[in-house]
Amino acid sequence: MEQFDQLEMDTLNAMFDYPLDYEIEEGGTYYYDPDLNPEVNPYSWQYVVIPINKPIPNIPHEKIADLVLDVSAVEKSPERAAVLWDMLETEALRLTGNLNEKESDTKGCWTPSGRITVWDDVVGRQIPLQGVKVRARWWFFWETGFTDSNGNYTVSGTFKGGRKVNYSIIWERSNWDIREEDWGQAYYNGPKKDSEWNLDITSDKSLRYATIHRALLNYYYGDRLGLRTPYTPSVLKPKLKVGYYHHDHWRDINGSAVPFRENLTIPHVCIYGKDGSGSWSTTDFVYATTCHEVAHVSHWEMIGEGAFAILWLNPKTRIIPESWALTVQWMFTNNEYRKMLNIYNLQSLKEYNYRDGYQKWDKGSDNYYTPLFIDFIDEYNQKQRIGGDRPNDRISGYSISSLEMI
Protein backbone atom coordinates (compact mmCIF):
# COMPACT_ATOMS: atom_id res chain seq x y z
CA MET A 1 0.00 0.00 0.00
CA GLU A 2 2.86 2.38 0.76
CA GLN A 3 4.33 1.79 -2.71
CA PHE A 4 0.93 2.35 -4.35
CA ASP A 5 0.48 5.58 -2.39
CA GLN A 6 3.90 6.72 -3.54
CA LEU A 7 2.89 6.21 -7.18
CA GLU A 8 -0.53 7.77 -6.73
CA MET A 9 0.76 10.92 -5.01
CA ASP A 10 2.42 11.86 -8.31
CA THR A 11 -0.65 13.15 -10.12
CA LEU A 12 1.07 12.75 -13.51
CA ASN A 13 0.78 8.98 -13.15
CA ALA A 14 -2.48 7.81 -14.75
CA MET A 15 -2.45 4.20 -13.59
CA PHE A 16 -4.19 1.22 -15.16
CA ASP A 17 -4.60 -2.26 -13.66
CA TYR A 18 -4.14 -3.98 -17.02
CA PRO A 19 -1.63 -3.78 -19.91
CA LEU A 20 -2.56 -0.98 -22.30
CA ASP A 21 -1.78 -3.02 -25.40
CA TYR A 22 -4.47 -5.59 -24.47
CA GLU A 23 -7.98 -5.59 -25.85
CA ILE A 24 -10.72 -5.76 -23.21
CA GLU A 25 -13.14 -8.44 -24.41
CA GLU A 26 -15.33 -8.54 -21.30
CA GLY A 27 -16.02 -5.69 -18.89
CA GLY A 28 -15.77 -5.92 -15.14
CA THR A 29 -15.22 -4.01 -11.91
CA TYR A 30 -11.75 -5.25 -10.99
CA TYR A 31 -8.72 -6.92 -12.59
CA TYR A 32 -5.92 -8.99 -11.07
CA ASP A 33 -3.03 -10.36 -13.12
CA PRO A 34 -3.68 -14.14 -13.40
CA ASP A 35 0.06 -14.85 -13.40
CA LEU A 36 0.41 -13.54 -9.84
CA ASN A 37 -0.40 -15.25 -6.55
CA PRO A 38 -2.70 -12.97 -4.48
CA GLU A 39 -1.47 -14.54 -1.25
CA VAL A 40 2.07 -13.48 -2.07
CA ASN A 41 1.33 -10.36 -4.12
CA PRO A 42 -2.03 -8.86 -3.05
CA TYR A 43 -1.50 -5.92 -5.39
CA SER A 44 -1.57 -6.47 -9.13
CA TRP A 45 0.85 -4.70 -11.47
CA GLN A 46 0.03 -1.09 -12.31
CA TYR A 47 0.66 0.20 -15.85
CA VAL A 48 1.60 3.77 -16.74
CA VAL A 49 2.79 5.74 -19.74
CA ILE A 50 5.30 8.41 -18.73
CA PRO A 51 7.82 10.73 -20.45
CA ILE A 52 11.08 8.97 -21.14
CA ASN A 53 13.06 11.32 -18.87
CA LYS A 54 10.64 11.13 -15.93
CA PRO A 55 12.26 9.50 -12.87
CA ILE A 56 10.63 6.32 -11.57
CA PRO A 57 10.24 5.91 -7.79
CA ASN A 58 12.50 3.41 -6.09
CA ILE A 59 10.01 0.55 -6.14
CA PRO A 60 10.02 -2.71 -8.18
CA HIS A 61 9.27 -1.90 -11.81
CA GLU A 62 9.84 -3.09 -15.36
CA LYS A 63 10.04 -1.03 -18.53
CA ILE A 64 7.98 -2.85 -21.15
CA ALA A 65 8.76 -0.71 -24.19
CA ASP A 66 9.81 2.68 -25.50
CA LEU A 67 6.92 4.35 -27.30
CA VAL A 68 6.95 7.02 -30.01
CA LEU A 69 3.66 8.86 -29.50
CA ASP A 70 4.37 12.32 -30.94
CA VAL A 71 6.13 13.52 -34.09
CA SER A 72 5.16 17.18 -33.83
CA ALA A 73 8.53 18.08 -32.28
CA VAL A 74 10.28 17.45 -35.60
CA GLU A 75 7.78 19.34 -37.72
CA LYS A 76 7.50 23.09 -38.12
CA SER A 77 3.82 22.86 -39.10
CA PRO A 78 1.41 21.35 -36.53
CA GLU A 79 -1.06 20.59 -39.32
CA ARG A 80 1.59 18.73 -41.31
CA ALA A 81 2.67 16.88 -38.15
CA ALA A 82 -0.90 15.77 -37.49
CA VAL A 83 -1.21 14.40 -41.03
CA LEU A 84 2.09 12.50 -40.76
CA TRP A 85 1.15 11.13 -37.34
CA ASP A 86 -2.22 9.93 -38.64
CA MET A 87 -0.51 8.22 -41.58
CA LEU A 88 2.01 6.56 -39.25
CA GLU A 89 -0.70 5.32 -36.88
CA THR A 90 -2.88 4.05 -39.71
CA GLU A 91 -0.06 2.12 -41.39
CA ALA A 92 1.10 0.63 -38.06
CA LEU A 93 -2.44 -0.57 -37.35
CA ARG A 94 -2.74 -1.99 -40.84
CA LEU A 95 0.53 -3.91 -40.58
CA THR A 96 -0.44 -5.41 -37.22
CA GLY A 97 -3.99 -6.32 -38.27
CA ASN A 98 -5.63 -3.83 -35.89
CA LEU A 99 -7.15 -1.42 -38.42
CA ASN A 100 -10.92 -1.62 -38.89
CA GLU A 101 -12.43 -0.65 -42.23
CA LYS A 102 -14.66 2.03 -40.77
CA GLU A 103 -11.70 3.81 -39.21
CA SER A 104 -9.67 3.78 -42.42
CA ASP A 105 -12.57 5.26 -44.40
CA THR A 106 -13.74 7.90 -41.89
CA LYS A 107 -12.40 11.45 -41.89
CA GLY A 108 -12.40 14.02 -39.10
CA CYS A 109 -12.59 13.52 -35.33
CA TRP A 110 -15.19 12.71 -32.70
CA THR A 111 -15.52 13.35 -28.95
CA PRO A 112 -16.73 10.57 -26.61
CA SER A 113 -19.67 11.56 -24.40
CA GLY A 114 -22.76 10.12 -22.73
CA ARG A 115 -24.84 9.99 -19.55
CA ILE A 116 -24.53 7.99 -16.29
CA THR A 117 -27.41 7.32 -13.88
CA VAL A 118 -27.80 5.18 -10.76
CA TRP A 119 -30.74 3.50 -9.04
CA ASP A 120 -31.89 4.81 -5.66
CA ASP A 121 -34.09 2.68 -3.39
CA VAL A 122 -35.77 5.59 -1.59
CA VAL A 123 -36.65 7.57 -4.71
CA GLY A 124 -37.46 4.34 -6.56
CA ARG A 125 -35.94 5.39 -9.87
CA GLN A 126 -32.72 6.16 -11.72
CA ILE A 127 -31.11 9.46 -10.75
CA PRO A 128 -28.23 11.35 -12.42
CA LEU A 129 -24.80 10.44 -11.07
CA GLN A 130 -22.68 13.55 -10.68
CA GLY A 131 -18.92 13.95 -10.47
CA VAL A 132 -18.02 10.56 -11.94
CA LYS A 133 -14.65 10.20 -13.66
CA VAL A 134 -15.19 8.68 -17.11
CA ARG A 135 -12.23 7.65 -19.25
CA ALA A 136 -12.13 6.93 -22.98
CA ARG A 137 -9.00 5.03 -24.09
CA TRP A 138 -7.55 3.97 -27.41
CA TRP A 139 -4.32 2.00 -27.02
CA PHE A 140 -1.87 4.30 -25.21
CA PHE A 141 -4.03 7.42 -25.47
CA TRP A 142 -6.89 8.40 -23.21
CA GLU A 143 -9.08 11.36 -22.43
CA THR A 144 -11.08 12.01 -19.27
CA GLY A 145 -14.33 13.76 -18.40
CA PHE A 146 -16.61 14.19 -15.37
CA THR A 147 -20.39 13.93 -15.22
CA ASP A 148 -22.36 17.08 -14.42
CA SER A 149 -25.44 17.43 -12.20
CA ASN A 150 -27.56 15.81 -14.93
CA GLY A 151 -25.17 12.85 -15.30
CA ASN A 152 -23.87 14.07 -18.67
CA TYR A 153 -20.19 13.98 -19.57
CA THR A 154 -17.88 14.85 -22.46
CA VAL A 155 -14.21 13.86 -22.37
CA SER A 156 -11.49 16.47 -22.74
CA GLY A 157 -10.19 15.49 -26.19
CA THR A 158 -11.01 13.94 -29.53
CA PHE A 159 -10.26 10.71 -31.41
CA LYS A 160 -9.99 9.98 -35.11
CA GLY A 161 -13.34 9.43 -36.78
CA GLY A 162 -14.43 5.77 -36.79
CA ARG A 163 -11.92 4.89 -34.08
CA LYS A 164 -13.45 2.83 -31.27
CA VAL A 165 -12.50 3.67 -27.69
CA ASN A 166 -12.72 1.65 -24.48
CA TYR A 167 -15.00 3.46 -22.04
CA SER A 168 -14.57 3.05 -18.29
CA ILE A 169 -15.52 4.60 -14.96
CA ILE A 170 -12.73 5.06 -12.43
CA TRP A 171 -14.18 5.34 -8.93
CA GLU A 172 -11.75 7.97 -7.69
CA ARG A 173 -11.27 11.70 -7.33
CA SER A 174 -8.34 13.80 -6.19
CA ASN A 175 -9.30 13.27 -2.53
CA TRP A 176 -10.33 9.61 -2.46
CA ASP A 177 -10.17 6.13 -4.00
CA ILE A 178 -12.89 3.51 -3.78
CA ARG A 179 -11.24 0.12 -3.46
CA GLU A 180 -12.28 -3.44 -4.31
CA GLU A 181 -12.04 -4.69 -0.73
CA ASP A 182 -8.53 -4.07 0.64
CA TRP A 183 -6.44 -3.64 -2.48
CA GLY A 184 -7.76 -3.19 -6.00
CA GLN A 185 -8.95 0.03 -7.63
CA ALA A 186 -12.71 -0.14 -8.20
CA TYR A 187 -13.83 0.66 -11.73
CA TYR A 188 -16.43 -0.19 -14.35
CA ASN A 189 -15.17 -1.32 -17.73
CA GLY A 190 -17.66 -0.29 -20.36
CA PRO A 191 -17.93 -1.17 -24.05
CA LYS A 192 -15.60 -0.46 -26.93
CA LYS A 193 -17.42 1.75 -29.43
CA ASP A 194 -17.16 4.75 -31.72
CA SER A 195 -20.25 6.55 -30.40
CA GLU A 196 -21.58 7.87 -27.09
CA TRP A 197 -21.86 5.59 -24.06
CA ASN A 198 -24.86 5.79 -21.75
CA LEU A 199 -25.01 3.69 -18.58
CA ASP A 200 -27.79 3.01 -16.05
CA ILE A 201 -26.28 1.45 -12.92
CA THR A 202 -28.91 -0.73 -11.25
CA SER A 203 -27.37 -3.49 -9.14
CA ASP A 204 -24.44 -5.49 -7.81
CA LYS A 205 -21.09 -3.98 -6.83
CA SER A 206 -21.39 -1.04 -9.19
CA LEU A 207 -24.56 0.14 -7.44
CA ARG A 208 -22.67 0.22 -4.13
CA TYR A 209 -19.61 1.90 -5.65
CA ALA A 210 -21.86 4.57 -7.15
CA THR A 211 -23.72 5.12 -3.87
CA ILE A 212 -20.48 5.40 -1.89
CA HIS A 213 -19.31 7.88 -4.55
CA ARG A 214 -22.49 9.95 -4.06
CA ALA A 215 -21.87 10.19 -0.32
CA LEU A 216 -18.19 11.09 -0.74
CA LEU A 217 -18.96 13.71 -3.40
CA ASN A 218 -21.52 15.44 -1.20
CA TYR A 219 -19.36 15.24 1.93
CA TYR A 220 -16.38 16.78 0.13
CA TYR A 221 -17.94 19.10 -2.44
CA GLY A 222 -21.64 19.45 -1.59
CA ASP A 223 -23.55 21.03 1.28
CA ARG A 224 -21.50 20.01 4.33
CA LEU A 225 -23.79 22.00 6.65
CA GLY A 226 -20.80 24.00 7.84
CA LEU A 227 -18.62 21.03 8.83
CA ARG A 228 -14.90 20.98 8.13
CA THR A 229 -13.53 19.34 5.00
CA PRO A 230 -12.81 15.71 5.87
CA TYR A 231 -9.48 13.96 5.41
CA THR A 232 -7.58 15.69 2.60
CA PRO A 233 -4.45 14.24 0.95
CA SER A 234 -1.21 16.18 0.66
CA VAL A 235 2.32 15.70 -0.63
CA LEU A 236 3.10 13.38 2.27
CA LYS A 237 -0.37 11.96 2.87
CA PRO A 238 -2.18 9.55 0.50
CA LYS A 239 -5.78 9.75 -0.64
CA LEU A 240 -8.63 8.59 1.56
CA LYS A 241 -9.10 4.88 0.79
CA VAL A 242 -12.66 3.54 1.02
CA GLY A 243 -12.86 -0.24 0.73
CA TYR A 244 -16.13 -1.89 -0.35
CA TYR A 245 -16.73 -5.55 0.64
CA HIS A 246 -19.49 -7.28 -1.31
CA HIS A 247 -20.56 -9.64 1.46
CA ASP A 248 -21.44 -9.86 5.16
CA HIS A 249 -19.31 -7.84 7.52
CA TRP A 250 -16.44 -9.87 8.93
CA ARG A 251 -14.98 -7.07 10.97
CA ASP A 252 -16.76 -5.89 14.11
CA ILE A 253 -19.38 -3.58 12.54
CA ASN A 254 -21.11 -2.83 9.22
CA GLY A 255 -18.67 -0.09 8.43
CA SER A 256 -15.47 0.88 10.13
CA ALA A 257 -13.07 3.78 10.20
CA VAL A 258 -9.51 2.77 10.90
CA PRO A 259 -7.18 5.04 12.89
CA PHE A 260 -3.45 4.37 12.61
CA ARG A 261 -4.03 3.66 8.90
CA GLU A 262 -0.35 4.07 8.03
CA ASN A 263 0.48 1.00 10.11
CA LEU A 264 -2.17 -1.20 8.53
CA THR A 265 -2.86 -2.69 5.13
CA ILE A 266 -6.59 -1.99 5.01
CA PRO A 267 -8.38 1.17 3.83
CA HIS A 268 -9.24 4.09 6.08
CA VAL A 269 -12.95 3.26 5.71
CA CYS A 270 -14.60 -0.14 5.19
CA ILE A 271 -18.17 -0.46 3.87
CA TYR A 272 -20.01 -3.80 3.66
CA GLY A 273 -22.73 -4.86 1.24
CA LYS A 274 -24.90 -6.59 3.82
CA ASP A 275 -26.30 -5.23 7.05
CA GLY A 276 -26.19 -6.85 10.48
CA SER A 277 -29.09 -9.18 9.63
CA GLY A 278 -27.36 -10.54 6.53
CA SER A 279 -29.64 -8.71 4.06
CA TRP A 280 -28.31 -6.54 1.27
CA SER A 281 -28.22 -2.94 2.46
CA THR A 282 -30.46 -0.39 0.77
CA THR A 283 -28.83 2.51 -1.03
CA ASP A 284 -29.77 5.02 1.69
CA PHE A 285 -28.14 2.76 4.29
CA VAL A 286 -24.92 2.55 2.21
CA TYR A 287 -25.02 6.32 1.74
CA ALA A 288 -25.53 6.96 5.47
CA THR A 289 -22.87 4.44 6.54
CA THR A 290 -20.32 6.08 4.23
CA CYS A 291 -21.04 9.49 5.77
CA HIS A 292 -20.79 7.93 9.24
CA GLU A 293 -17.37 6.39 8.64
CA VAL A 294 -15.91 9.46 6.93
CA ALA A 295 -17.11 11.48 9.94
CA HIS A 296 -15.01 9.17 12.12
CA VAL A 297 -11.96 9.80 9.94
CA SER A 298 -12.56 13.55 10.10
CA HIS A 299 -12.95 13.30 13.88
CA TRP A 300 -9.67 11.47 14.44
CA GLU A 301 -7.92 13.90 12.12
CA MET A 302 -9.28 16.83 14.13
CA ILE A 303 -8.40 15.60 17.64
CA GLY A 304 -5.44 13.39 16.76
CA GLU A 305 -5.23 9.64 16.35
CA GLY A 306 -4.10 9.03 19.92
CA ALA A 307 -7.01 10.93 21.47
CA PHE A 308 -9.47 9.29 19.09
CA ALA A 309 -8.13 5.82 19.91
CA ILE A 310 -8.65 6.48 23.63
CA LEU A 311 -12.28 7.44 22.99
CA TRP A 312 -12.85 4.58 20.57
CA LEU A 313 -11.29 1.74 22.54
CA ASN A 314 -12.73 2.61 25.94
CA PRO A 315 -16.30 1.19 26.26
CA LYS A 316 -17.17 4.03 28.61
CA THR A 317 -16.32 6.77 26.10
CA ARG A 318 -17.04 5.17 22.73
CA ILE A 319 -20.50 6.74 22.91
CA ILE A 320 -18.85 10.07 22.00
CA PRO A 321 -17.36 9.20 18.56
CA GLU A 322 -20.25 6.89 17.62
CA SER A 323 -22.99 9.35 18.57
CA TRP A 324 -21.16 12.15 16.76
CA ALA A 325 -20.77 10.11 13.55
CA LEU A 326 -24.42 9.08 13.87
CA THR A 327 -25.42 12.74 13.97
CA VAL A 328 -23.39 13.50 10.84
CA GLN A 329 -24.96 10.61 8.91
CA TRP A 330 -28.44 11.61 10.13
CA MET A 331 -28.01 15.22 9.00
CA PHE A 332 -26.32 14.44 5.69
CA THR A 333 -28.69 11.65 4.67
CA ASN A 334 -31.82 13.57 5.58
CA ASN A 335 -30.49 16.62 3.76
CA GLU A 336 -29.73 14.59 0.62
CA TYR A 337 -33.07 12.81 0.44
CA ARG A 338 -35.23 15.79 1.28
CA LYS A 339 -33.50 17.62 -1.55
CA MET A 340 -34.00 14.73 -3.97
CA LEU A 341 -37.59 14.07 -2.97
CA ASN A 342 -38.42 17.70 -3.55
CA ILE A 343 -36.76 17.52 -6.97
CA TYR A 344 -38.80 14.45 -7.94
CA ASN A 345 -41.95 15.76 -6.20
CA LEU A 346 -42.74 12.59 -4.26
CA GLN A 347 -45.28 13.99 -1.81
CA SER A 348 -45.59 10.85 0.30
CA LEU A 349 -41.89 11.01 1.22
CA LYS A 350 -41.32 14.76 1.52
CA GLU A 351 -40.46 14.43 5.21
CA TYR A 352 -37.84 11.74 4.75
CA ASN A 353 -36.25 11.01 8.11
CA TYR A 354 -33.44 8.48 7.99
CA ARG A 355 -34.31 5.55 10.30
CA ASP A 356 -36.62 7.84 12.35
CA GLY A 357 -33.57 9.99 12.98
CA TYR A 358 -32.73 7.63 15.84
CA GLN A 359 -35.27 9.61 17.80
CA LYS A 360 -36.97 6.49 19.13
CA TRP A 361 -33.84 5.40 20.92
CA ASP A 362 -34.29 4.33 24.49
CA LYS A 363 -31.71 3.57 27.13
CA GLY A 364 -30.25 0.12 26.71
CA SER A 365 -31.23 -0.38 23.07
CA ASP A 366 -27.84 0.82 21.80
CA ASN A 367 -24.95 1.47 24.12
CA TYR A 368 -22.93 3.58 21.66
CA TYR A 369 -25.21 4.78 18.86
CA THR A 370 -27.32 7.37 20.63
CA PRO A 371 -29.05 10.70 19.77
CA LEU A 372 -26.72 12.45 22.22
CA PHE A 373 -25.71 15.16 19.72
CA ILE A 374 -28.92 15.00 17.70
CA ASP A 375 -30.73 16.17 20.83
CA PHE A 376 -28.74 19.40 20.75
CA ILE A 377 -30.12 20.13 17.26
CA ASP A 378 -33.70 18.85 17.06
CA GLU A 379 -36.89 19.72 18.89
CA TYR A 380 -38.01 16.15 19.48
CA ASN A 381 -38.45 14.87 23.04
CA GLN A 382 -37.70 11.28 23.99
CA LYS A 383 -39.95 11.26 27.06
CA GLN A 384 -42.62 9.32 25.12
CA ARG A 385 -40.32 6.31 25.00
CA ILE A 386 -38.26 6.70 28.15
CA GLY A 387 -41.16 7.71 30.40
CA GLY A 388 -41.28 10.01 33.39
CA ASP A 389 -43.04 13.27 34.12
CA ARG A 390 -40.26 15.66 33.14
CA PRO A 391 -38.86 16.02 29.63
CA ASN A 392 -35.56 14.20 29.15
CA ASP A 393 -34.54 16.26 26.11
CA ARG A 394 -34.84 19.97 26.81
CA ILE A 395 -32.04 21.21 24.52
CA SER A 396 -32.40 22.37 20.91
CA GLY A 397 -31.25 25.02 18.49
CA TYR A 398 -27.59 24.11 18.05
CA SER A 399 -26.16 23.69 14.57
CA ILE A 400 -24.08 20.65 13.70
CA SER A 401 -21.14 22.88 12.75
CA SER A 402 -21.15 24.56 16.18
CA LEU A 403 -21.07 21.14 17.86
CA GLU A 404 -18.05 20.12 15.78
CA MET A 405 -16.08 23.00 17.31
CA ILE A 406 -16.90 22.11 20.92
Image: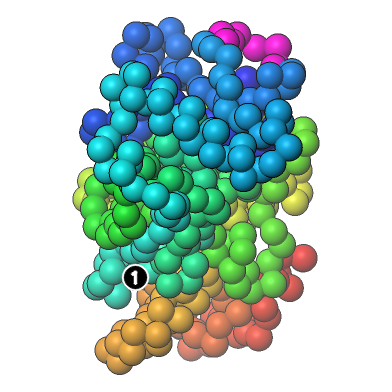
Q: Is residue 295 visible?
A: yes
Tell me residue 319's x, y (percent). Answer: 57, 55
Q: Mark 1 falls on what kind of element?
A: strand
For residue 59: magenta? yes
Magenta: predominant secondary structure element?
loop
Closer to us: 125 or 370: 125
The residue under the point 50% across, 76% down is 335
As rendered, which of 238 and 104 lies closer to the eye?
Answer: 104
**Tag count in the figure?**
1
For the point 77% across and 65% down, the residue is 405
Which region shows up in magenta? 56-63
Q: Give the crowd class for mark 1: few <14, some 14-19, many >=20 residues within 10 Å.
A: some
Q: Is residue 172 magenta?
A: no
Question: In which quadrant of the rendered view does residue 139 lie?
Answer: top left
Q: Quadrant of the N terminus?
A: top right
Q: Is residue 263 left or right of residue 96?
A: right
Q: Nearer the viewer, residue 146 or 205?
A: 146
Q: Is residue 282 above or below residue 2?
A: below
Residue at 54% over, 12% down = 65
